[in-house]
Amino acid sequence: MKRYDVAVIGAGATGAAVAWQLSHYQLKVALLDRCADACFGVSKANSGIIHGGFHHSAAKTLKAKLELEGNPMFDDLQKELGFEFVRCGIIVVAYSEEELPALRKLYEQGVANKVPGIELCDRKRLLELEPKLTEAATAGFFVPRGGVIEPYGYVFSLVESAELNGVEFWRNFAVVSSEREGDFRRLRAADGRVIEARFTVNAAGLYADEISRLCGGEEFEIKPRKGEEYLLDRTSAARPSRVVFPVPTPCSKGMLVIPTAGGTTMIGPSAVMTEDKEETGTTAEEREKIFAHSRKMVDGISERDLVAAFSGLRPVLVGNEDFYIARSEKAPDLIQAAGIQSPGLTASPAIGVYIKDLLGKCGLALEPKSEPRKKLPPEKRARDLSPEEIDKLHADDKLASRIICRCEFISEAEIVAAVRRGHVTLDGVKFRTRAGMGRCQGGFCAPRIMQIISQESGIPLEQLTKRGPGSELLAGHLGDLEVK
Amino acid sequence: MKKIDCDVLVIGAGGAGLSAAQAAASAGAKVLTVDREEACGGVLCQCIHNGFGLRFFNAELTGPEYALRMERAARESGAEIRCGETVSSVVRRSDGTFEATLFSAADGVTKVESRAAVFTTGCRERTRANIAVPGDRCAGIYTAGSAQKLMNLNGMLPGRRALIVGSGDIGLIMARRCRWSGIEVAAVIEILPEPSGLPRNIAQCLRDFDIPLLLSHRCRKIIGRNRVEAAEVENMTTGEVMTFKCDTILFSVGLIPENELLKAMGAKLNPATGGPGVDSSLQCSVPGVFAAGNSLHVHDLVDFASLEARRAGESAARYASGAGLPAAELPVSCSRSLKYVVPGRCAAGESCEFFFRPTVSCRRAKLSFLADGSEIAKKMCVSVRPAEMLTMKADVPAEAKNLSFELEECK
Amino acid sequence: MKRIICITCPTGCEMEVDEKEGKILCTGNRCPRGAAYAETELRDPRRVVTAVLRCTDGRFQPVRTDKPLPRKLIAGLLNTILKKSFPEAEPGAVIVSDIGNTGVNLIASGPAR
């Protein structure tokens, strides 16, 4: 049986950041996820914002403290890991006189939190910063250090870098039971695989309550709060240059207009408490609300530009709006990291450090590795290279110049690389490469991508899935069914 | 980096592109045709059903048979065809020539210099997301064309029980294709009160198989955790909602002309067609750039796309030779019963083939060509419906200012 | 009286067909092919069948019947050919001859892909 110093349950932003941090030390680390790939849970379906650090009080909440620590860490992380990230800036806009007091309060919280460069704006200044704001934009404030990120690109790069540096990533590992055995904790998967670890980090997102229970930890409840998002074509006239926030409501940061790192315009999210942790359907009601709301914020929003929609579930820790990151008092080998809603993505690098330090305090020896860190090979993204550079690549790899996804300009080499890195689902390849995220939404390229995944991984076509077992893309071969 | 020089570059080697290539080469131009797929024929390769070629070849052919004939004709005329090449950009240089950048596994990056370019880049399908169907995003949701490709080029089954959304020809053909592969078809649903596809396809694809056609119905919600489990369908007349059990949903909800390369060149698009505005030589607002086929406006029959593309190929060859094209400055408009007229500009005194889409359905209608308010030509049309394109060859008067077309229903 | 749609060409004439004293009467057709279609449709309905075959090298080749096949033979034909694999044929070559003694052949209608 495999034995580890630390097992991290959950390969979303939190778990991946922790595993990545720990991969700098002489430790045996396992990263587990119940899904077929990392980042298939909460971290996949969110707004992709690197927040500015003004929504929550740093004096009163852990989440604000970690958000403010995490935000600046993204520049170095991007240099090292190569994910898409743009510090385009955030503007918070009041669209009426009534909203001004709440706006002011938020701004002052930002000042108290010492948000760098935070600037109060009159309408004139707002329009300088973002000309596409509607007539109703009254006043606001600007946070230059806010930005946008491709969350799955970020999480995948953390996991890949961690794996390159010794972390073992266990896919399709849903922990169904756990028991202590001496100094170790056994974690058992549904399919019978077992591992042992001295310490366990519960970064299980929507299922953190269940994992805590299984490990003899604290009793709490995670309830899902669904947020729908709508993506407009990259040619949308509404694409702003900054992330546009409204004045928040008591229950959510509001519906935004986001110039995504991928080039599309995203509007949303909504916020509706639900019961089912696996139900992520979009609805006509919330779509209408989101479009109506975003039309008030920015000019040029059109339903005709709609190219994609999705929804995600926030893991709401009932009774606690802050992050719950602490050593479990009931199970001393367990570190809880639950209720990581927004600004979880922004805070994640800081959460990684925080939990690494917590583990140190728990007695985990943190010896930095003596050998140099293995770097991720530089990405050779056809869309970022000049024709001359691609032509040079072609000399060594013909697939570097065969374009599979025409809408996003993704080469076969990129897709093959993704499959070789363990992304064997269509969604995994999509999130890793962007292939299938364009105008045609995979209409042209999905059959070819499926063939490439099958060829590279050896998985027969009919066993390929969209996102893991149960989501098989095809139902069999011609000839399998009787013609009547 | 590889460099190729030619007179006419044709982008897209489908039913239109191969025709344009053959026409341009026959007119004496050095022609290079490129296509991003590994073989010619475009979407015809996956259209294994018959019904093509009645006008162009006077024969009833399957898509691949049509494509093969077109490819042979293009090659025999001397046009060069390179498949597996993706064009990332076409730039018009200050001297009026064009430089296109191509990417392929075979040759890496290739620069093609040409004196004219013909864009026959076809369409993409409208997706579930484009029409904002709520519900789950599970496996088993396909556009009809994507499913057709998986079945006919990969020999795979998209599902075992399908619901088809949209009664256009692609959806109807796929209904039959499913049944001829053993896939059950729960129904074909159509949001409009009339079917969009040809009556012959209603007969041979639905009635033959007792597949219900539900008009004025829409897909309200997709249900399925990881794979499609059911679809909620709403009867828009009564409000009744029914749930169809299925494991796959095929969306056949319209085609959108693909013109990203043209847009990047600054060509002006016609919002009524989704394609570039063109004159009677099929030249768009960028001199030396021509368009034809589905990317110019959505066709129903590939025969018309091929016929149209001939004109584009001839014009491109003429332009490339320096011979010049007739100045086609006269704007042509159309009345409310017509969605558009292509081309939108023509030359005084020429004979021109015009294409239209009606916005109305009626048994008989009169298509009139008006010059300065007077009818100078007419054509009687039967079985007029938005799903079927109309054509009319008309002589443009030597002297006229306001040219327009009108469609009037006959009682 | 039966209402049928002629499938011979894309026009798809809606016809009314009657059988009286052994003769088939047809109205609504715009050309003689419609009347011919009505005859066969009532007596011996036939369809051109199109499909793809699995080639021995794993690729797929489009096929068609060279003439319309009696409807009652279609399922049997498809079930037989879909379960087998065939060597790649030249477009136009006969793959299965004289299906069910009807004189209708299954031919290749394009290259294998």
Image: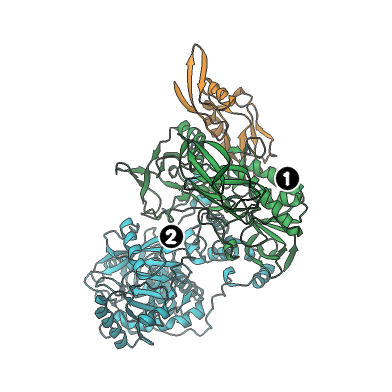
Chain colours: A cyan, B green, C orange
Q: Secondary structure at mark 2?
A: strand
Q: Where is residue A482 drawn, in percent x and y? A: 49, 35
Q: Is residue A121 shown above or below C47?
A: below
Residue toward you, B341 or A43 = B341
Residue toward you, B117 or A317 = B117
Q: Where is residue A26 drawn, in percent x and y? A: 45, 81
**Residue that appears at 32% across and 65% down:** A270
**Residue that appears at 45% across and 73% down:** A154
Q: Are marks 2 and 1 in contact (CB under 8 Å)?
A: no
> Is label 2 on the same chain as label 1?
no
Which amino acid type corresponds to the residue marked 1 in the rendered image?
A: Ala
Residue toward you, C2 or C44 = C2
Q: Is residue B389 left or right of residue B281?
A: left
Which amino acid type corresponds to the residue marked 2 in the rendered image?
A: Ala
Residue indicated by mark 2: A308
Crowding near pointer 2: few (<14 within 10 Å), some, many (20+)? many
Q: Is residue B209 visible?
A: yes
